[in-house]
């Protein structure tokens, strides 16, 4: 059980999240992602990200 990282707290919640501009690798739309896009790695907008998520991971959500 190497879980106990107590240093990570709600602190960052107060700060506005930093978003990075990126171009979706799928539809080519400009989008903003909450992480720094890595060169050579595909970046997806929200819609495409959902599309590209593996479905067989146990938890499925339908709406
Ligand atoms: Zn897209």
Image: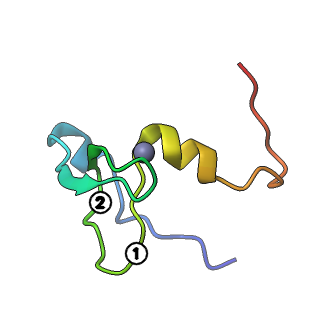
- For label 2, the residue is 35
* Dot 1 crowding, Cα within 10 Å, few <14, some 14–19, many 20+: few
Task: Determine if the C-beta at disc 1 is less than 8 A from ligand 1.
Answer: no
Residue 21 place in picture, x, y as percent: 18, 52
Residue 17 place in picture, x, y as percent: 20, 45
6 vs 62, nearest the viewer: 62
43 left or right of 52?
left
7 vs 47, nearest the viewer: 47
8 left or right of 16?
right
Residue 40's quadrant in the figure? bottom left
Residue at figure coordinates x 61%, y 45% from the top left: 51
Secondary structure at numbered mark 1: loop
- For label 1, the residue is 41
The earlier-in-sequence mark between 2 and 1 is: 2
16 vs 14, nearest the viewer: 16
Task: Determine if the C-beta at disc 2 is less than 8 A from ligand 1.
Answer: no
Residue 59 place in picture, x, y as percent: 79, 43
Using the image, determine if residue 63 lies above or below residue 15. Answer: above
Per the model, the C-alpha gap separating discs 2 and 1 is 12 Å
* Dot 2 crowding, Cα within 10 Å, few <14, some 14–19, many 20+: few
Residue at figure coordinates x 46%, y 70% from the top left: 5
* Quadrant of the drawing holding the C terminus: top right
Residue 15's quadrant in the figure? top left
* Quadrant of the drawing holding the N terminus: bottom right
Secondary structure at numbered mark 2: loop
Using the image, determine if residue 8 lies above or below residue 60. Answer: below
């Amino acid at each position: 059980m190497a879980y106990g990282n107590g240093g990570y707290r709600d602190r960052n919640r107060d700060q506005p999240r930093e978003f990075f501009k990126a171009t979706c690798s799928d539809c080519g739309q400009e989008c903003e992602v909450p992480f720094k896009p890595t060169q050579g790695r595909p970046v997806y907008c929200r819609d495409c990200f959902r599309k590209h998520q593996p479905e067989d991971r146990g938890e499925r959500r339908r709406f």
